[in-house]
Image (cartoon, rainbow, N blue to C red):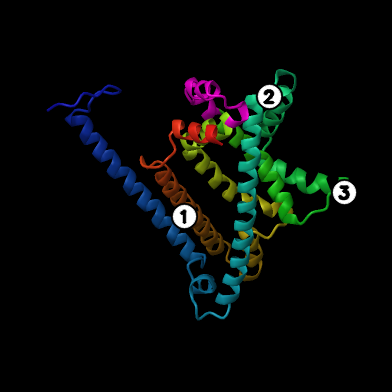
Amino acid sequence: MTTTHVLYDAPGPRTRRRIRWGTAALLTALAAVLALVVARLSRQGQLDEAKWSPLVNPSDPQFGLVWDFLGGGLKATLQAAAVSIVLSLALGSALAVTRVTAAAWYRWAVVGFIELFRGVPVVLSVFFAARVLPEIGVDLPTMWFLVIGLTLYNSVVIAEVIRAGIQALPKGQGEAAYAIGLTRGATLRLILLPQAFRITLPVLIGQLVVVLKDTSLGFIISYEELLRRGQIAVQTLENPLQMFFVVGAIFILVNFSLSKLAEAVQRRLSRPGRRSDPPAVVAAGTAA
């Protein structure tokens, strides 16, 4: 049995030998670089037990204090992320529906708002909220300035994702709903939006992970989330490499858990036995 390669020619014996030798050379070079890095860190004392002990040794007097301090930062991170995710989804859905249903005379305002905050860096949105809002008399807890900045940026991204999902649906979905007497709002709420959320769920999951990671930008406004607390702890422990390694590992673990949870939700929603077919929804809407 032969395999046809459409995008490239199958490598011959000589090419395969070159690939194997090149791979072996690259792995050897990477191992040598890693060994040099480890040796240099060891000479600088970065691998000493004293620098790792407050983070990994429960018998260390500072172990409990350090993890309680980092735990408070993690709690602040999750709190800001949860509020930002909920607000971003709500505002993003509203913007998507408004852009789809808007009349020509005010659609430009919705599109302008979306395009404006799509082009503004999220760090600038956070800084703007923290510096400008207090100047006009809006005095809020620091977390809310971070939430406002994250929501402004992520909601417009989510709005475009949902709008693309709505436009990707067959036109017959909406036409059938109109034919049985559903209003435009009911058609969106009962027919189009549920399907749009389902087909765009992988992209939405990725954006929600981005929201969680972007909470680390709270350090620029002195919000004591996980990264900021790590920076504060470094000033006392003087172990930046070890501390930021642990903080990065925590972020990876939390994001990985969020991704797996979202994938489980997606698999559950994709089960063929769930009552989510468009005709059933249309019938329910008509009965109501």
116 in the magenta segment: no
| Circle 1 SS class | helix
The crowding category of the residue bearing disc 1, from other C-alpha atoms within 10 Å (few below 14, some 14 to 19, many at least 20), is few
Q: For mark 2, what is the residue?
A: 102
The residue shown at (56%, 29%) is 187
Q: Which of 125/158 is in front?
A: 158
| Residue 155 placement, left or right of 1 | right
Q: Which of 185/254 is in front?
A: 185
The three-letter amino acid code for the residue at tag 3 is Gly
The three-letter amino acid code for the residue at tag 1 is Ser
Please name which of the two marks, 2 or 3, marks the residue nearer to the observer. 2
Q: Which of 79/194 is in front?
A: 194
Image: 128 above or below 34: above
Total numbered circles: 3
Please name which of the two marks, 2 or 1, marks the residue nearer to the observer. 2
Q: Main secondary structure of the magenta part?
A: helix
Image: 253 above or below 206: below
Q: Give the magenta range.
A: 164-186
The three-letter amino acid code for the residue at tag 2 is Ala
Residue 17, position as x, y percentages in the image = 21, 35
Determine contact: label 2, label 1, CB under 8 Å: no
Sequence-wise first label, 3 or 1: 3
- Quote the CA–CA distance across marks 2 and 3: 32 Å
Residue 123, position as x, y percentages in the image = 68, 43
The residue shown at (43%, 34%) is 277
Q: For mark 1, what is the residue?
A: 257
- Quote the CA–CA distance across marks 3 and 1: 39 Å
The residue shown at (63%, 57%) is 79
Number of the label disc, if any, that sits on residue 137: 3
| Circle 2 SS class | loop
